[in-house]
Image (spheres, helix red, strand yellow):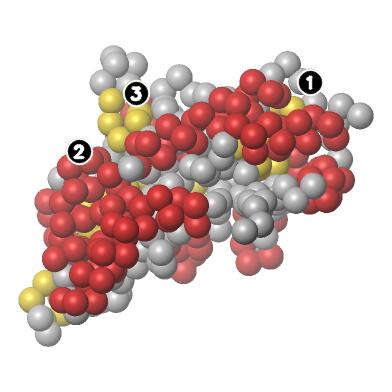
Amino acid sequence: MEKTVKKIQMVDLKTQYEKIKPEVDAAIQNVLNNTAFINGPEVKAFQAELEEYLGTKHVIPCANGTDALQIAMMALDLKPGDEIITADFTYVATAEVIALLGLKPVLVDVIPDTFDIDINAIEKAITSKTKAIVPVHLFGQCANMEALMQLAKKHNLYVIEDTAQAIGAVYRYTDGTTKKAGTIGTIGCTSFFPSKNLGCYGDGGAIFTNDDALAAKIRMIANHGQSVQYIHDSIGVNSRLDSIQAAILRIKLRDLDNYAAARNKAAAHYDKAFANNSKLKTPARAKYSDHVFHQYTLQLNGVDRDKLREFLASKDIPAMIYYPIPLHMQKAYLDPRYKAGDFPVTEKLCASVVSLPMHTELDEETLNYISSSVLEFVNR
Ligand SMILES: *Cc1c(COP(=O)(O)O)cnc(C)c1O
């Protein structure tokens, strides 16, 4: 048989699946056999295992990460007109649900080295209408949660962590104690979209909280606003994680820390290859957070990004721009409060970042090929 050269992908789910195929296939078959497709025992088992892994009291599974954010905001009884502060440099879902619920997204800039939400900018954006802050643990590294929680406490604000990209990341307080990403704020929200660090084979999401009353309310809202069947105490949504996805997630959760280690190994390779190159700024490591490298994102300095991507594409290496347009410049989110130049860090990042292939299955040979190709273009 001819040896096929493996195509380089941003995320290689196939090779990862092949390594756990017998377990995954058996788990799916098991759900097919017992036909408990919705709210089956796999969902309850996954919920308990994720609670244990995260060290949080309650995990409420739901249909996707966007729903998780929406349900979290509904559970906090936020009212139209309430102001919610979030980062300008993020995936659209964060701001989308704020706008969808008639709340007012208040955007703030990020800090340039870690891509984290800027705590000083949050403080300046707080008004008497501010009700919550939504930090995004972008690319796999936690925002500065200790400072953020102090600020939230001072102003009596809720904190909803968007940890769709950072599940498993460990946050470190200045006194040395640690907590997992998503378990620090009032509520944490995550996504199990296939390409996320803990990805299922379809859509999925979850909400975390340590508050018993809030957990009950979140559960109720995710289930049509009912805690007793056909008794609807509040307007809810229909948002469920199905049993097949839960069965797959149970298997992948056991490997999550190994997956993070594999991602860190790939990141270390890139870091070393690009160290001391004035045209490439490698992602900074915050002293307060582990990095689980959902993305490995370089900042280019004096490099034509489109030409670099074309060059890499010609060598069958994909590279992506996360994210090309700041939220305040997106047509759907244009707002007279904001104009070009208002968030200079985000605007600069959107123009200069590029993310390289990052997943759990990158071998040395592939990493060498990718990094030497980047350097070949940059240094010529
Ligand atoms: C993926 C993602 C979401 C949304 O998750 P879905 O499961 O796709 O709805 C929200 N926020 C961030 C930061 C994400 O990366």
Residue depicted at x 28% and y 57%: 23
Q: Measured along the vertical axis of the image, is residue 25 above or below residue 152? A: below
Residue in the foreground of this view, choosing between 204 and 201: 201
Q: Is mark 2 within 8 Å of ligand 1?
A: no
- Which quarter shows the C terminus? top right
Q: Amino acid at mark 2?
A: Gly
Q: CA distance from mark 3 to mark 1?
A: 30 Å
Between residues 151 and 368, which one lies in front from this camera angle? 368
| Residue 265 locus on image (x, y percent) | 51, 29
> Can you name the residue that lies furthest to the left here?
228
Tag 2, which secondary structure?
A: loop
Q: Quadrant of residue 70?
A: bottom left
Question: Which residue occupies 34% across, 67% down?
Answer: 63
Distance between the Cα atoms at labels 3 and 2? 14 Å
Label 1: few (<14), some or many (≥20) within 10 Å?
A: few
Which labelled disc corresponds to residue 55? 2
Q: Amino acid at mark 1?
A: Ser
Category of crowding for the residue at label 3, using alpha-carbon neighbours closer than 10 angstroms: few (below 14), some (14–19), many (at least 20) = many
Left or right: 134, with 298 as reference point: left
Q: Quadrant of the N terminus?
A: bottom right
Three-letter amino acid code of the residue under disc 3: Arg
Extreme residue toward the right, this view: 380
Residue 212 point in image, percent of width and height: 12, 51
Asked if marks 2 and 1 touch (Cβ < 8 Å), the reply is no
Is 327 in front, or is 59? 59
Q: From the image, tell me which residue sits under label 1.
A: 278
Q: Which mark is residue 125?
A: none
> Is residue 46 in view?
yes
Q: Could you say whether the residue bearing mark 3 is in a helix, strand or loop?
A: strand
The residue beneath circle 3 is: 172
